[in-house]
Image: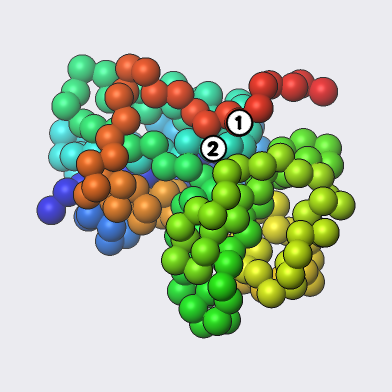
Protein backbone atom coordinates (compact mmCIF):
# COMPACT_ATOMS: atom_id res chain seq x y z
CA UNK A 1 0.00 0.00 0.00
CA UNK A 2 1.30 3.43 -0.98
CA UNK A 3 -0.95 6.39 -0.22
CA UNK A 4 -0.78 9.19 -2.75
CA UNK A 5 -2.16 12.71 -2.79
CA UNK A 6 -2.56 14.12 -6.30
CA UNK A 7 -3.06 17.78 -7.21
CA UNK A 8 -4.38 19.53 -10.30
CA UNK A 9 -3.88 23.30 -10.46
CA UNK A 10 -2.70 23.87 -14.04
CA UNK A 11 -6.01 25.35 -15.20
CA UNK A 12 -9.43 26.26 -13.84
CA UNK A 13 -9.56 23.03 -11.83
CA UNK A 14 -8.41 23.31 -8.23
CA UNK A 15 -8.44 19.78 -6.94
CA UNK A 16 -6.88 17.08 -4.80
CA UNK A 17 -7.44 13.33 -4.81
CA UNK A 18 -6.31 10.47 -2.59
CA UNK A 19 -5.18 7.14 -4.05
CA UNK A 20 -4.06 3.79 -2.71
CA UNK A 21 -1.38 3.21 -5.32
CA UNK A 22 -3.46 3.96 -8.45
CA UNK A 23 -6.89 3.21 -6.95
CA UNK A 24 -8.95 6.34 -6.34
CA UNK A 25 -10.23 6.71 -2.76
CA UNK A 26 -11.57 10.27 -2.73
CA UNK A 27 -11.49 13.45 -4.81
CA UNK A 28 -12.36 17.06 -4.03
CA UNK A 29 -12.36 19.54 -6.91
CA UNK A 30 -13.56 23.07 -7.49
CA UNK A 31 -14.00 24.42 -11.02
CA UNK A 32 -13.68 28.10 -10.19
CA UNK A 33 -11.14 30.56 -11.57
CA UNK A 34 -8.55 32.15 -9.29
CA UNK A 35 -9.44 30.11 -6.20
CA UNK A 36 -6.33 27.91 -5.94
CA UNK A 37 -4.44 30.01 -3.41
CA UNK A 38 -7.35 30.14 -0.98
CA UNK A 39 -8.70 26.61 -1.46
CA UNK A 40 -5.83 24.12 -1.73
CA UNK A 41 -5.05 23.78 1.97
CA UNK A 42 -8.71 23.53 2.98
CA UNK A 43 -9.49 20.96 0.28
CA UNK A 44 -6.54 18.86 1.43
CA UNK A 45 -7.59 19.03 5.08
CA UNK A 46 -11.21 18.19 4.27
CA UNK A 47 -10.23 15.22 2.12
CA UNK A 48 -7.87 13.72 4.70
CA UNK A 49 -10.37 14.22 7.53
CA UNK A 50 -13.17 12.64 5.50
CA UNK A 51 -11.25 9.37 5.10
CA UNK A 52 -9.60 9.32 8.54
CA UNK A 53 -6.06 9.91 7.28
CA UNK A 54 -3.42 12.52 8.05
CA UNK A 55 -0.42 14.00 6.27
CA UNK A 56 1.77 11.53 8.17
CA UNK A 57 0.10 8.66 6.30
CA UNK A 58 1.04 9.93 2.83
CA UNK A 59 3.87 8.19 0.95
CA UNK A 60 4.09 10.46 -2.08
CA UNK A 61 2.47 13.46 -3.72
CA UNK A 62 1.85 13.88 -7.44
CA UNK A 63 1.29 17.28 -9.00
CA UNK A 64 0.21 18.47 -12.41
CA UNK A 65 3.38 19.90 -13.95
CA UNK A 66 1.76 21.79 -16.82
CA UNK A 67 1.89 23.37 -19.23
CA UNK A 68 -1.07 25.56 -18.39
CA UNK A 69 -1.88 28.56 -16.27
CA UNK A 70 1.32 30.20 -15.01
CA UNK A 71 -0.42 31.37 -11.85
CA UNK A 72 -2.11 28.04 -11.17
CA UNK A 73 1.11 26.10 -11.65
CA UNK A 74 3.08 28.47 -9.46
CA UNK A 75 0.52 28.25 -6.65
CA UNK A 76 0.32 24.47 -6.91
CA UNK A 77 4.07 23.96 -6.73
CA UNK A 78 4.46 26.48 -3.92
CA UNK A 79 1.76 24.76 -1.87
CA UNK A 80 3.14 21.26 -2.43
CA UNK A 81 6.72 22.32 -1.62
CA UNK A 82 5.48 23.81 1.62
CA UNK A 83 3.42 20.71 2.36
CA UNK A 84 6.45 18.44 1.87
CA UNK A 85 8.93 20.66 3.72
CA UNK A 86 10.73 18.73 6.48
CA UNK A 87 9.00 15.45 5.57
CA UNK A 88 10.15 12.27 3.84
CA UNK A 89 7.20 12.35 1.44
CA UNK A 90 8.36 12.03 -2.15
CA UNK A 91 7.25 14.22 -5.06
CA UNK A 92 6.19 13.12 -8.54
CA UNK A 93 5.73 15.74 -11.28
CA UNK A 94 3.22 14.62 -13.92
CA UNK A 95 2.97 16.47 -17.26
CA UNK A 96 -0.63 17.60 -17.66
CA UNK A 97 -0.96 16.62 -21.32
CA UNK A 98 0.36 13.12 -20.63
CA UNK A 99 -2.12 12.66 -17.77
CA UNK A 100 -5.06 13.36 -20.07
CA UNK A 101 -3.70 11.09 -22.79
CA UNK A 102 -3.27 8.28 -20.26
CA UNK A 103 -6.87 8.77 -19.09
CA UNK A 104 -8.03 8.50 -22.72
CA UNK A 105 -6.50 5.06 -23.43
CA UNK A 106 -9.73 3.13 -22.83
CA UNK A 107 -11.71 5.52 -25.03
CA UNK A 108 -9.09 5.18 -27.79
CA UNK A 109 -9.44 1.41 -27.64
CA UNK A 110 -13.22 1.67 -27.81
CA UNK A 111 -13.01 3.99 -30.86
CA UNK A 112 -10.22 1.93 -32.44
CA UNK A 113 -8.23 5.16 -32.78
CA UNK A 114 -4.51 5.03 -33.48
CA UNK A 115 -3.54 8.38 -31.99
CA UNK A 116 -4.46 10.97 -29.39
CA UNK A 117 -4.18 14.75 -29.58
CA UNK A 118 -4.11 16.51 -26.21
CA UNK A 119 -4.91 20.21 -26.23
CA UNK A 120 -4.74 22.87 -23.50
CA UNK A 121 -5.59 26.50 -24.22
CA UNK A 122 -2.75 28.93 -23.54
CA UNK A 123 -3.96 32.45 -24.38
CA UNK A 124 -5.62 34.28 -27.24
CA UNK A 125 -5.52 31.94 -30.29
CA UNK A 126 -2.71 29.71 -28.97
CA UNK A 127 -2.83 26.19 -27.60
CA UNK A 128 -0.41 23.67 -26.09
CA UNK A 129 -0.62 20.51 -28.20
CA UNK A 130 1.01 17.09 -27.98
CA UNK A 131 0.55 13.89 -29.99
CA UNK A 132 0.39 10.46 -28.37
CA UNK A 133 -0.21 6.96 -29.69
CA UNK A 134 -3.19 4.88 -28.56
CA UNK A 135 -1.30 3.67 -25.48
CA UNK A 136 -0.44 7.25 -24.43
CA UNK A 137 3.21 7.08 -25.45
CA UNK A 138 4.28 10.49 -26.71
CA UNK A 139 5.10 10.69 -30.42
CA UNK A 140 6.13 14.32 -30.42
CA UNK A 141 7.14 17.18 -28.17
CA UNK A 142 4.76 19.77 -26.77
CA UNK A 143 4.04 22.41 -29.40
CA UNK A 144 2.39 25.82 -29.27
CA UNK A 145 -0.06 26.07 -32.16
CA UNK A 146 -2.82 28.42 -33.25
CA UNK A 147 -6.36 27.36 -34.08
CA UNK A 148 -5.85 27.24 -37.84
CA UNK A 149 -2.70 25.12 -37.57
CA UNK A 150 -4.48 22.59 -35.38
CA UNK A 151 -7.38 22.38 -37.81
CA UNK A 152 -4.87 21.57 -40.55
CA UNK A 153 -3.30 18.63 -38.70
CA UNK A 154 -3.48 15.63 -41.07
CA UNK A 155 -6.30 13.18 -40.34
CA UNK A 156 -7.47 15.17 -37.33
CA UNK A 157 -10.99 13.77 -37.69
CA UNK A 158 -9.72 10.26 -36.95
CA UNK A 159 -7.87 11.26 -33.77
CA UNK A 160 -9.01 11.35 -30.16
CA UNK A 161 -9.09 15.00 -29.05
CA UNK A 162 -8.84 15.47 -25.28
CA UNK A 163 -7.92 18.06 -22.69
CA UNK A 164 -9.78 21.31 -21.95
CA UNK A 165 -8.55 22.88 -25.19
CA UNK A 166 -10.56 20.30 -27.15
CA UNK A 167 -13.69 22.26 -26.21
CA UNK A 168 -12.56 24.88 -28.75
CA UNK A 169 -12.84 22.24 -31.49
CA UNK A 170 -16.43 21.01 -31.18
CA UNK A 171 -17.40 18.25 -33.64
CA UNK A 172 -13.74 17.76 -34.61
CA UNK A 173 -12.19 14.34 -34.10
CA UNK A 174 -13.49 11.87 -31.53
CA UNK A 175 -14.26 13.41 -28.16
CA UNK A 176 -15.64 12.34 -24.79
CA UNK A 177 -16.82 15.08 -22.42
CA UNK A 178 -15.19 13.47 -19.38
CA UNK A 179 -11.78 13.83 -21.03
CA UNK A 180 -12.17 17.54 -21.69
CA UNK A 181 -11.58 18.67 -18.11
CA UNK A 182 -8.37 18.32 -16.10
CA UNK A 183 -8.82 16.48 -12.81
CA UNK A 184 -6.52 15.38 -9.97
CA UNK A 185 -7.54 11.75 -10.47
CA UNK A 186 -5.89 11.83 -13.92
CA UNK A 187 -2.70 13.04 -12.23
CA UNK A 188 -2.98 10.34 -9.58
CA UNK A 189 -3.49 7.50 -12.05
CA UNK A 190 -0.38 8.39 -14.02
CA UNK A 191 1.50 9.52 -10.92
CA UNK A 192 1.25 5.98 -9.51
CA UNK A 193 2.98 4.65 -12.63
CA UNK A 194 5.71 7.29 -12.47
CA UNK A 195 6.25 6.48 -8.79
CA UNK A 196 6.44 2.72 -9.43
CA UNK A 197 9.03 3.41 -12.15
CA UNK A 198 11.14 5.51 -9.80
CA UNK A 199 10.41 8.79 -11.59
CA UNK A 200 10.78 10.95 -8.49
CA UNK A 201 11.24 14.73 -8.60
CA UNK A 202 13.60 16.57 -6.30
CA UNK A 203 11.35 18.72 -4.12
CA UNK A 204 13.82 21.57 -3.73
CA UNK A 205 14.55 22.08 -7.43
CA UNK A 206 11.11 21.11 -8.81
CA UNK A 207 9.66 23.60 -11.29
CA UNK A 208 6.52 23.55 -13.43
CA UNK A 209 6.68 22.74 -17.13
CA UNK A 210 5.96 26.26 -18.39
CA UNK A 211 7.04 25.61 -22.04
CA UNK A 212 6.91 29.34 -22.85
CA UNK A 213 7.80 32.54 -21.03
CA UNK A 214 5.08 34.34 -19.10
CA UNK A 215 3.15 36.82 -21.24
CA UNK A 216 0.57 38.88 -19.31
CA UNK A 217 -1.00 40.32 -22.45
Label 1: state its secondary structure.
loop
Could you tell me if the residues under marks 2 and 1 are in contact, i.e. CB atoms within 8 Å?
Answer: yes
Q: Measuring 37% from the left and 44% from the top, which residue is drawn there?
A: 6
> Mark 1 packing: few (<14 Cα in 10 Å), some, or many (20+)?
few
**x, y percentage for residue 92?**
33, 37
Q: Residue at x 78, y 40 (%)?
A: 126
Q: How many angstroms separate mark 2 from mark 1 (CA)?
A: 8 Å
Task: Please give the label number shown on residue 211.
Answer: 1
Residue 141: percent from left, percent from top: 57, 44
Left or right of 216, for residue 47: left
Residue at image point 28% right, 35% down = 200
Q: Nearer the viewer, mark 2 or mark 1?
A: 1
Residue 206 position, x and y percent, is 39, 23
In the image, what residue occupies the spot 23% across and 32% down?
A: 90
- Give the vertical position of 143 relative to 39 (above or below): below
- The mark nearer the N terminus, 2 or 1, is 2
- For residue 11, the mark is none
Vertical relation: 60 (above or below) 210: below
Mark linked to residue 66: 2
Q: Characterize the local packing of mark 2: few (<14), some (14-19) or many (20 or more) Cα atoms within 10 angstroms.
A: many
Q: Residue furthest left?
A: 1
In the rendered view, how is the structure colored? rainbow
Tell which of 165 and 212 is nearer to you. 212
Residue 85 falls left or right of residue 171: left
Of 171 and 13, nearer the camera is 171
User: Which image quadrant: the C terminus?
Assistant: top right
Where does residue 64 sit, x and y in percent of width and height? 46, 40
Tell me if I can see residue 182 in this picture: no
Amino acid sequence: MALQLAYETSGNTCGVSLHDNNELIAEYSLYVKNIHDAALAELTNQLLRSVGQSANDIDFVSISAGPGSFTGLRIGYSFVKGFLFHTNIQLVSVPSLHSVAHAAIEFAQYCDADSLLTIVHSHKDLFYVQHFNKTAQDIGNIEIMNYESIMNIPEIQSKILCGPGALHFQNIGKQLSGLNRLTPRFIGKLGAIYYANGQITDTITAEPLYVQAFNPS
